[in-house]
Amino acid sequence: MKKLLIVLVFTVFQSNVAQENNTVSVFHRLLIYNSDNQIMLVKIKGKGAEVWVTPGIYQDSNQFIKKGLDDLVKTYGIETSSPELKGVFSVQYENDEKKEMWLRNYYTCKYIKGDIHFPKNQPFTVSEIKWVSLEKSLEMLSHEFVKLMLEQTHNNPNLVSGGSISVFKENHKVKVKIEEEFYPLFHKN
């Protein structure tokens, strides 16, 4: 009985430690389409590099998802249709220093009106904004795993997709591996 109690206490302790050390980063990516079915891309500078991405926000404990997406759109000075969830993807990122798990949610919406401007008071600097075709966006986007998820959501407009991707370094190069092929979470009628 004493051994069982010790094992139980140790198991609960280990579980709590694991939960404290294993956080999941949640990012909401917004694919904004204009009337020509072009996607809005932004060039941002942060952490010493400039990258092309679609607008997005990290989830924090102070904001609900819809409010965060609405605020994101407003930072660009535009109005859009209500965002629709199109993808829920898990990404395992590993480099020499750390191993992280990310959750990436993809939403789509339509540009309605407004003069696009560069966001202010952000942790990054937007240096350029462009409307581009899917093909051009796949050439311009800076991260291969983002391209895969964008292509999946764009090519399946009546589907909410899931899937899992690993991002890792091999011989000093960033590699991407699909761990779970993309699959339907549910269909939009």
Image: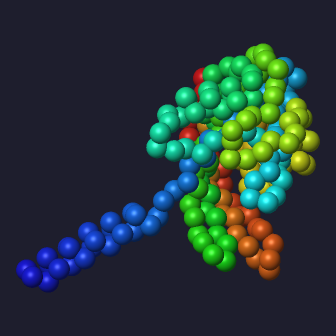
Q: How is the image coloured?
A: rainbow
Depicted 61 relative to depicted 165: above or below: above
Toward the viewer: 59 or 10?
59
In the rendered image, the residue lying farthest to the bottom is 3
- Residue 85: image quadrant is top right
Query: Does residue 73 appear in the picture of this structure?
Result: yes
94 displayed left or right of 131: left
Depicted 165 relative to depicted 37: above or below: below
Q: What residue is shown at x 75% (from left), y 29% (from top)?
A: 76
- Residue 78: x percent and y percent? 74, 22
Depicted 151 relative to depicted 32: above or below: below
179 displayed left or right of 6: right
In the rendered image, the residue lying farthest to the left is 1
61 displayed left or right of 184: left
Count of numbered tags: 0
Toward the viewer: 91 or 100?
100
Q: What residue is shown at x 61% (from left), y 63% (from top)?
A: 92
Query: Does residue 108 appear in the picture of this structure?
Result: no
Q: What residue is shown at x 67% (from left), y 72% (from top)?
A: 95
Q: What residue is shown at x 63% (from left), y 22% (from top)?
A: 82
Toward the viewer: 137 or 124?
124
- Residue 163: x percent and y percent? 62, 51
- Residue 73: image quadrant is top right
- Residue 126: x percent and y percent? 80, 42
Which quadrant would the N terminus be assigned to in this image?
Answer: bottom left
- Residue 23: x percent and y percent? 48, 59
Which quadrant would the C terminus be assigned to in this image?
Answer: top right
In the rendered image, the residue lying farthest to the top is 113
